[in-house]
Amino acid sequence: MKVPKEINTYCPKCDKNTTHTVKFYTKKPEGGLTEGTRRNARKRTGYIGKVKGQATVKKVGKRQKALLKCKTCSYTVERVFGTRTKKKLEFKI
């Protein structure tokens, strides 16, 4: 899905429509010392493979998220573009 680099949209802080710069959201990788990782490693000691069974779920495309930053007040808002899609977001040229 192609998105322009600047979008004129509503800013909740300014309470009016202003220009926003678009930046794509990327999730940071989880650390190895999170509680869930430690709990799973503790459960798996002595076993080979996963503790719980494989999920029998059909894969669905992700909802693409972008960060909109207001140019006047520099307030950042998250926005989901479109429905679930397997195509990545990219900027229009």
Image (tube, helix red, strand yellow):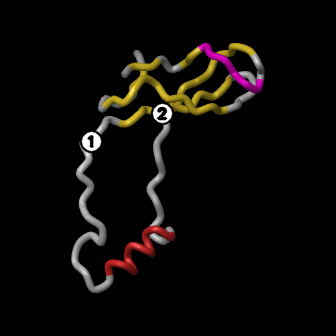
Magenta span? 8-13
Picture coordinates of residue 50 (x, y %)?
27, 70
Graded by Cα atoms within 10 Å as few (under 14), some (14 to 19) or many (20 or more), the crowding at tag 2 reads some
Identity of the amino acid at label 1?
Lys
Between marks 2 and 1 in the image, the one whose residue lies nearer the viewer: 1
Quadrant showing the N terminus: top left
In-front residue for pair 87/49: 49
Tell me the residue at 62%/21% (across/down).
20
Of residue 69 and residue 37, the one placed in the foreground of this image is 37
Q: Which mark is residue 36?
A: none
Query: Looking at the image, which residue is at 30% across and 72% down?
Result: 51
Residue at image point 37% right, 36% down:
62
Q: As shown in the figure, which amino acid type bears the numbered disc 2?
A: Lys
Q: Give the secondary structure at mark 2.
A: strand
Q: What x and y, as percent, mark residue 31?
A: 47, 64
State yes or no: residue 9 in magenta.
yes
Q: Position of residue 47 (x, y in %)?
A: 25, 81
Above or below, comparing residue 52 to residue 82 in the picture: below
- Residue identified by numbered label 2: 65
Main SS of residues in magenta: strand
Which corner quadrant holds the C terminus?
top left
> Label 2, label 1: how many angstroms apart (C-alpha)?
18 Å
Q: Is residue 49 left or right of residue 6?
A: left
- Report whether 9 appears left or right of 47: right
Residue at position x 49%, y 29% from top? 80
Q: What is the x, y in percent for residue 43?
A: 36, 78
Q: Earlier in the sequence, mark 2 or mark 1?
A: 1
CB under 8 Å between discs 2 and 1: no
Residue 59 disc label: 1
Question: Looking at the image, is 56 positioned above or below residue 24?
Answer: below
